Image (cartoon, grey):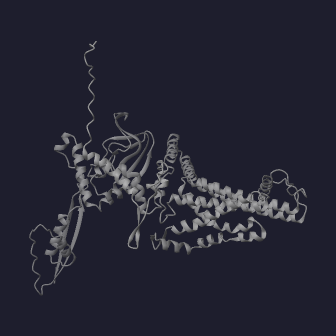
Amino acid sequence: MRSPGTPSTAPPAPPPPPPPPPGDEKKDEAPAAKEEEEEEKDLELPFKILGRPVKIPRLSKYLRLPKLPKVPDWLRPIVEYRFPSSIDPFTDLIYVIWLFIVVAAWNWNMWLIPVRWAFPYQTPENIHVWLLIDYTCDLIYITDILVFQTRLQFVRGGDIVCDKKDMRENYMSTERFKMDVISLFPMEVFYYFTGVNSLLRFPRLFKYMAFFEFNDRMEAVMKKAYIYRVIRTSTYLLYSLHINACLFYWGSDYEGLGSTKWVYDGKGFAYIRCYYFAVKTLITIGGLPDPTTVFEICFQNINYFVGVFAFSIMIGQMRDVVGAATAGENYYRACMDSTIKYMNSYNIPREVQNRIKTWYDYTWKSQGMLDEQELLIQLPTKMRLDIAVDVNYAIVSKVALFQGCDRQMVFDMLTRLKSVVYLPGDFVCKKGEIGREMYIIKQGEVQVVGGPDLQTVFVTIRAGSVFGEISLLAGGGGNRRTANVKAHGFANLFILDKKDLAEILVHYPESQKLLRKKAKTMLTKDKKPDEKGGGKEVVVIPARPDTPKMFKAALKVAEQAGIEGAFTKLRESYRPSDGTEDVAPPPSPAPGHGTDSSMVIRMTSREAGEEVLIVEEKKKTE
């Protein structure tokens, strides 16, 4: 304890924080001060009155408004969206969505105009609701004409036109513009005389071109367009039944509800009862009460006739839609059935038949087609190249042999690749075979096997790998397979033929030299030590052979014999350029000693591959 006389000592206070550097303080205060000055600064107009500037004070100086909340990330693209000056009608998704809205407005008129005309669903109590939706659809029509249709790009002379004036003039010169204007004809002015009659809105149905355009865009966007076609064809049938139901109620009301057994008796939900009658009539189910009056008989006869005609059309359309959707599968079944019939006629073993059936089944399920070339052959060369680059370039670019080659050469090579499916256990190539293809594994695995029973697995090659590329370039006996390769499971391989590569390299001599150099290096590296010292050298992409020496000798003999013409010209074209001296031509025969000479040239070949040229000269002296 401290004594009473001892003064108390307080603990030392912590030192104050160091002041921020003057530079940083100014940096932090400068932007804030600048923003405050800009907010408090009056707005100066770009003109003067009596030589003095006109300023408008900002409300922020006198009234502090709350700041708006931050826009969420999911809403930012919508807020920042700017309407384009031109629209591509084939690829713009916004335009497809807008067409959906226009078609919805058109369907409102298509389905509800006959319902409001025939059935008593439009009453004075709900008339404001009907009119509100009607005029909303009209506003959609007007917006489509003024905003969207005048901004659609079009093609003129092969060029895509994006100019606003040209796009507007092009739209106004089309048949669609005329129909769009007719669809907005204001027949509602007759409401003053007839009341609100929905039939006066029938011009709105002339907007039908938007419906067909929307169908085309939907089929282009959807992956399985046949589903939409089935739905659309079914809708046609439902709409025909819908119109028939409306006409039946109108006829029943004309005859008197419940006046006969044939007409609608007025009980239950009117639309559902009349729709049921339309279904039984158009599909000709039967079981309907017999008409009694002339009006009922005529109405029913027309109903039957139209029903049979319309229903047969719908069945035909549905058959075409389903047939187009299953055309590929039907082709696959036909090919498979023909192959099975052929194998049975020649008594092919059952094991081979089962493997062929398995190949058909797996190829169809994995690719959706039996031969990709049948589909691509219909496309232009540029589009085939684009598809090949997207599908195959990522794999081919990894091949070390083609790295450094001309990029266009690789693109040309992509269009020559062929897809082949191998079944489990199938040998892709066997040792000693003549190699004419290079293989790129697209899907699956292959194994390099050996041993007495070819069951020993040396290495497994997986998707994205390449083998057999040396066989494309080697010649003179160096293109034989050196290993056995078989598929492990189902394997989908790309094959590049040697002949196709040779046709491509003719146009790319630099790439040919590079490939020749790389292939020679690979062959030397793969040789065993005892093979490097001796033995015959393997030819890799042999260069064009020089003119045979014996043929040159024949040309020289021909010239010495005094035969002018074709042989002498050939000799001049094959004259060596290394500076060697030519033999002087012999003097021409003296006058008066004319000679008549003839020469016979024969060339024979021997077993060793050598060629022997025999030249015989016969002279006749006058």
Query: Left or right: 550 with respect to 369?
Result: left
Count of numbered tags: 0
Relative to 178, 517 lies left or right: left
Q: Where's residue 602, x and y in %?
A: 23, 67
Q: Is residue 183 visible?
A: yes
Residue 557, placed above or below residue 69: below
- Image quadrant in which you'd find residue 310: bottom right
**Residue 40: % across, % down:** 40, 56
Residue under the image location 67 percent in, 67 percent down:
204
Q: Indicate whether 241 appears above or below 465.
A: below
Using the image, determine if residue 169 lies above or below residue 396: below
Residue 437 in sight here: no
Identify the image quadrant of the N terminus. top left
Residue 606 picture quarter: bottom left
Which residue is more in the foreground, 222 or 415?
Answer: 222
Q: x, y percentage for residue 397?
A: 33, 50
Q: Residue at x 86, y 63 (%)?
A: 254
Closest to the observer, 468 or 393: 393
Question: Depth check: 402 or 70 in front?
Answer: 70
At which x and y percent is residue 401? 28, 50
Q: In what quadrant of the picture does the C terminus appear?
A: bottom left
